[in-house]
Image: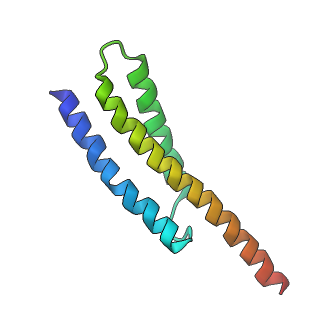
């Protein structure tokens, strides 16, 4: 039964990530985003995956949801870094021009 609650928790967390990634991609901005928050969430999923892989009695289907969420947070982190570099270049260009 506890696996069902874990799956529900992971699925509910996971529902927010596609929207978050899409919002970042559409806005092409890091405004309102926290790198620390993304890294902490990403790390949490990484440890969750490691825990499932190391557990002798883990339900492997739960691992799918951890990997899915980890992938979405990874995509959001990539977009954050990409747009952050673009914003930095634009700021340098604005100061020089």
Residue 32 appears in view? no
Relative to 12, is 1 on the left or the right? left
Name the residue at the top extreme: 56
Name the residue at the bottom extreme: 97
- Residue at the spot x=30%, y=31% of the render? 62
In the image, residue 28 above or below residue 59: below
- Residue 59 in percent (x, y) is at 28, 22
In the image, residue 7 above or below residue 50: below
Name the residue at the right extreme: 96
In the image, residue 1 above or below residue 94: above
State the quadrant of the C terminus. bottom right
Residue 34 appears in view? yes
- Residue at the spot x=47%, y=49% of the render? 73
In the image, residue 47 above or below residue 9: above
State the quadrant of the N terminus. top left
- Residue at the spot x=46%, y=25% of the render? 50
Question: How is the protein colored in the picture?
Answer: rainbow
- Residue at the spot x=31%, y=20% of the render? 58
């Amino acid at each position: 039964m506890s696996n069902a609650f874990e799956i529900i928790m992971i699925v509910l967390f996971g529902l927010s990530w596609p929207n978050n990634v899409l919002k970042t991609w559409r806005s092409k901005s890091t405004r309102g985003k926290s790198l620390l928050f993304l890294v902490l969430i990403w790390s949490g999923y990484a440890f969750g995956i490691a825990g499932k892989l190391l557990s002798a009695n883990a339900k492997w289907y739960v691992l799918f949801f951890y990997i899915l969420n980890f992938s979405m947070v990874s995509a959001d982190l990539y977009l954050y870094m990409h747009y952050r570099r673009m914003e930095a270049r634009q700021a340098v260009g604005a100061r020089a021009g």
